[in-house]
């Protein structure tokens, strides 16, 4: 298996890389631990974190893969913000259109990924007697799997769930509900509960949030921003952000006008919450905003401003911890627990190890993963057929390893993977252009067999560094 690369995860990012590998002739296996593809978008699998009311928060026109448009006949017939079921069907069409299915292996839970000699990697899979050896590994398992659960003093007598375990309005029907967190998932759950709960729904917010409408002037917001970004590309990011913020204020006013806390940060320095509903529901009295939770007392929740509310159920929409359970953290994280990678795509200290989708941005992760896949494919081919380009790329990656972000985002665990979509996509395209010959070369198979050896000893993070 000296020629083959292992792609771990058949969600959007893994599929994007697989499509590029098929086109470039790179042999690979696409391993998926579930019995079906789709990752977080498949509600029928344990990996699926969507719920019955989930829809895209970004318009499909700016989210779908650029090389696989939503339709060719009647794009106006497709929804602007489709449901999770539509998205899963789109992935299935993508797999069929580009011949990915023969490479897919379901029910393959990767237990460990460790280095071998000559840049090869050992992949241990649950239930398989012998580990596999690959020329490289692409980690595309996503970062929405391990729930982040804050620890509050006291004991709550009601039910507490994480948003990962929320699937249906039936779970919140006729209950006094508190949702902690005003991200996209939290606000979706607030909206669900507001329609089926007899009491006002409580929304706990640690800080003010910019609520961005899904439509501006009758067009999907992402489409408007993409067009404006193209026109204003030469302007600095802070100025473009100020212009968008001023436009939003002119169209709908500050959040405080709707009895919501005003943000203390510029609009582009935190992940946006796409919601037309929350300001309306708060102003209608169906949702009551509270500050951060301080402690629990039975069915009572005490907040940091001293207010006390009695609730039956708490939904923690508090995000996810960055976790790759089969890979030691020092291969991809720095001392600050942020990715220590080149463009969140590769660690130049570990040849043959790549990442796709390990990013959070205000735009399509699917498209970013496809751009990462182009870099990965070029790097793999350059290692074999254009060593001078591979060497130059490695030197660039070594110098530039670290965060791709040029801005200081809000200091929170949620923003450790954050990047501006437009700036980051331009950086990925620039990196891909470093390969001139390798970008048009076919993959050249080898006939030699790399010796299987024990991985180097890396007992501690300090030793690895």
Image: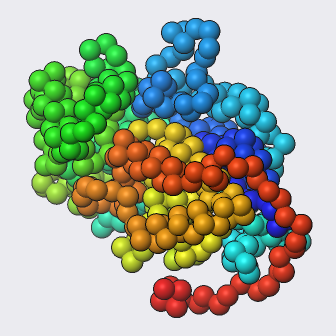
Please report the residue visible at 58 percent of the width from the left and 23 percent of the height from the top: 69
Seen at 75% across and 43% down, the residue is: 22
Vertical comparison of 377 with 203: above or below: below
Quadrant, the N terminus: bottom right
Residue 296 horizontal/vertical position (percent):
29, 59
Q: How far from the left and from the top, in percent, is residue 420?
A: 34, 46
Residue 218 in view: yes
Q: Residue at x 27, y 41 (%)?
A: 203
* In this picture, residue 450 sits left or right of residue 363: right
Q: How many marks?
A: 0
Describe residue 405's horizontal placement relative to residue 257 as left or right.
right
Task: Give percent across and percent down for residue 458.
Answer: 60, 88
Q: Residue at x 37, y 63 (%)?
A: 403
Tell me residue 294's x, y (percent): 23, 60
Determine the image quadrant of residue 131.
bottom right
- 32 up-or-down from 84: above or below: below
In this view of the protein, which residue sits in the foreground, 419 or 37? 419
Closest to the observer: 165 or 120? Answer: 120
Q: Is residue 260 visible?
A: no
Tell me if residue 278 comes above or below residue 148 in the rendering: above
């Amino acid at each position: 298996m000296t020629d083959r690369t292992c792609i771990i995860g058949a969600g959007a990012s893994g599929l994007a890389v697989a499509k590029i590998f098929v086109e470039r002739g790179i042999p690979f296996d696409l391993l998926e631990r579930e019995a079906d593809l789709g990752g977080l978008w498949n509600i029928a699998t344990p990996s699926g974190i969507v719920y019955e009311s989930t829809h895209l928060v970004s318009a499909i026109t700016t989210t779908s893969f650029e090389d696989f448009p939503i339709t060719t006949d009647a794009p106006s017939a497709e929804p602007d913000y489709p449901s999770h079921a539509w998205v899963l069907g789109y992935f299935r069409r993508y797999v069929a259109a580009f011949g990915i299915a023969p490479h897919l292996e379901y029910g393959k839970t990767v237990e460990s990924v460790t280095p071998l000699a000559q840049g090869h990697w050992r992949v241990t899979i649950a239930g398989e007697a012998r580990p596999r050896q690959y020329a490289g590994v692409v980690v595309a398992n996503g970062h929405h799997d391990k729930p982040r659960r804050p620890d509050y003093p006291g004991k709550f007598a009601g039910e507490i769930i994480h948003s990962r375990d929320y699937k249906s309005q039936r779970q919140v029907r006729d209950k006094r509900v508190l949702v902690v967190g005003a991200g996209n998932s939290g606000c979706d759950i607030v909206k669900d509960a507001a329609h089926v709960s007899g009491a006002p729904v409580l929304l706990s917010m640690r800080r003010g949030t910019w609520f961005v409408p899904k439509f501006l002037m009758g067009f999907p917001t992402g489409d408007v921003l993409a067009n404006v970004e193209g026109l204003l590309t030469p302007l600095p990011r802070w100025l473009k952000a100020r212009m968008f913020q001023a436009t939003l204020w002119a169209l709908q006013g500050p959040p405080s006008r709707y009895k919501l806390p005003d943000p203390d940060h510029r609009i582009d320095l935190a992940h946006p919450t796409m919601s037309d509903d929350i300001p309306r529901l708060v102003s209608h009295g169906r949702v009551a905003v509270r500050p951060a939770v301080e402690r629990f007392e039975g069915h009572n929740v005490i907040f940091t401003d001293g207010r006390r509310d009695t609730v039956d159920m708490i939904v923690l929409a508090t995000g996810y911890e960055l976790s790759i359970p089969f890979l030691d953290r020092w291969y991809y994280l720095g001392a600050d627990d942020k990715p220590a990678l080149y463009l969140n795509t590769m660690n130049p200290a570990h040849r043959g190890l790549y990442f796709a989708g390990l990013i959070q941005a205000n735009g399509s992760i699917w498209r970013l993963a496809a751009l990462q896949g182009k870099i990965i494919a070029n790097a793999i081919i350059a290692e074999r057929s254009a060593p001078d380009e591979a060497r130059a790329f490695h030197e660039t990656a070594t110098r530039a390893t670290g965060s791709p972000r040029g801005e200081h985002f809000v200091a929170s665990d949620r923003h450790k993977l954050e990047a501006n979509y437009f700036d980051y996509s331009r950086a990925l395209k620039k990196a891909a252009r470093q390969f001139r010959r390798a970008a048009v070369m076919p993959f050249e198979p080898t006939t030699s067999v790399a010796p299987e050896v024990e991985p180097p000893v890396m007992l501690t993070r300090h030793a690895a560094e």
